[in-house]
Amino acid sequence: MSVIKRGNQWCLRRRVPVEFQQIESRSEVWISLKTDSRRLACEKAPAVWNEQVAAWKARLSGHDDDAVKHFEAVQDLASAKGVRYMPLDQVVQLPIDTLLDRIETIANRDQRPDLLEAAAVLGTKQPPALTVTQALEAYWTLAKDKTFGKSEDQKRRWENPRKKAVRNFVSVVGDKPMNHITADDMLEFRGYWQERIEIGGLTANSANKDLIHLGEVLKTVNKMKRLGLDLPLDGLAFKEGEKSERPPFSDDWIRTKLLRPDALMTLNPEARAIFLGMVNTGYRPSEAACAAPRQFCLEAEIPHMVIAPREGRAIKNKNSKRVIPLVGVSLDAMRAFPDGFPTYRDSDATLSSTVNKYLRAHGLMESEQHVMYSLRHSFEDRLLRAGVDDRVRRDLMGHSLNRERYGQGGGLAFKAEMVQRIAF
């Protein structure tokens, strides 16, 4: 790399690397370092050269036939020229001095402007016509941060509703380019869901989830790829009725039905232990099913379970992280599986359905509305009736407190004493 003085200014002089000769007609380049100080010129030269290489790389990508890659290359080239890519209709609104600064960054070759650089800094390159299914494929990479810490099973369950929403939209409207999606298209998709609600017995909640997931995919791709599209996604949600609450199992039902010695004998042992573990903990089934062996502290002075994220497995939210005491039938159930539940550790998707089917088949559901999760509601109800402090209840359940948490909420021994009051 040579730093040479031309007139009063120092310049960088260097041969064009072979890999860029197909898009650079010069065999060597002279780049002004815009200083009359040799010391400053030597300091600036490496960064200036790196910017030039970045610009060449962007131009090289711009020769790709893939429309998406070509557009991204134009955006990268704009960045390499020191400006942010903006579509033409925004560029023409810039102050005249700013616009002239942009124009001055365009290189000239034999008294002619470089057309690719002109497209990059003046915004004349149109965004690619990504179809909805292509947008979904792009979304997985753009939203990768949303899957950090999730297991393969959690990723699958996160991906599936988004795939379903796109699949439903395409089945109704077609696999249209994003920039061709109209308000009528979205109303047609909403009409499809309205018919399913009226005739098919589906809920507004199901429809809204589809609309939310589809909107999330399209908005993310539009934003992250800087497509600048005005997507007609607002005002489509259905009004939801009052959310139905799952009833708790009554104390008498738990005592005389669920804890009857032979009641759960033929349920698979791991599912049985997880279910019984809920009785005196109120944990979410997945919190026990997916826990690692080290999270079961059964030989501690106060036996307990640590609910926390582990490698490859996230938990619901930050409030879910907690330590819960194990007492009564729940402690007995955990002692049968001190290393946890290998059947469900990496995939608990079938756990609830397995338990719910068993309980219904054996007459162990208190009503048609009851499910496995009703044990969690029962636990909280029993704590409430026993007069356990709101802070302690929320700590045990993994709920938010709606204020700053101070101290340890009484500590593990105190919580064990509170749970022992209502334990089976």
Image: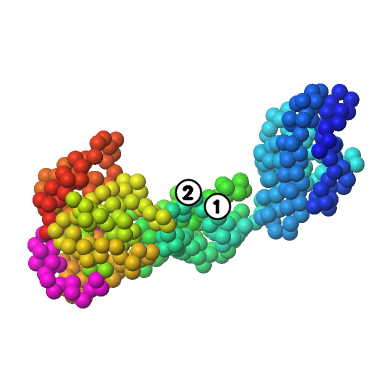
Q: Which amino acid is tagged 2? A: Asp
Count residues near mark 2 (Cα–Cα under 10 Å), then give few for <14, some for 14-19, many for 20+.
Answer: few
Tag nearer the camera, 2 or 1:
1
> Dot 1 lies on which element?
helix
Q: What's the residue type where badge 1 is placed?
A: Leu
Residue 98 colored in magenta in the image: no
Circle 1 packing at 10 Å, graded few (<14), some (14-19), many (20+), is some
Quarter of the view holding residue 281: bottom left
Res 424 seen here: yes
Residue 245 sits inside the magenta stretch: yes
In this picture, which residue range is highlighted in magenta?
244-269
Q: In the image, 324: left or right of 23?
A: left
The kind of secondary structure element at disc 2 is loop
Residue drawn at 73 percent across, 48 percent down: 58
Instruction: Estimate the x, y position of residue 163 in percent, counting from the top left.
Output: 49, 63
Please name whichever residue, 72 or 315, is drawn nearer the observer in this view of the structure.
315
Instruction: Assign the N terminus to one quadrant of the image.
Output: top right
How far from the left and from the top, in percent, is residue 141? Answer: 55, 55
Q: Is residue 365 left or right of residue 170?
A: left
Q: Is residue 213 above or below residue 99?
A: below
> What percent of the width, then of the height, locates residue 347?
37, 65
Q: Residue at x 83, y 51 (%)?
A: 18
Figure check: 365 above or below 246: below
On screen, residue 238 versus residue 360, left or right, reads right
Label 2 to label 1: alpha-carbon separation: 22 Å
Task: Mark yes or no: residue 132 visible.
Answer: no
Residue, disc 1? 142
Residue 165 left/right relative to 316: right
Q: Earlier in the sequence, mark 2 or mark 1?
A: 1
Residue occupied by mark 2: 234
Quadrant containing the C terminus is: bottom left
Which residue sits at x=51%, y=67%?
A: 171
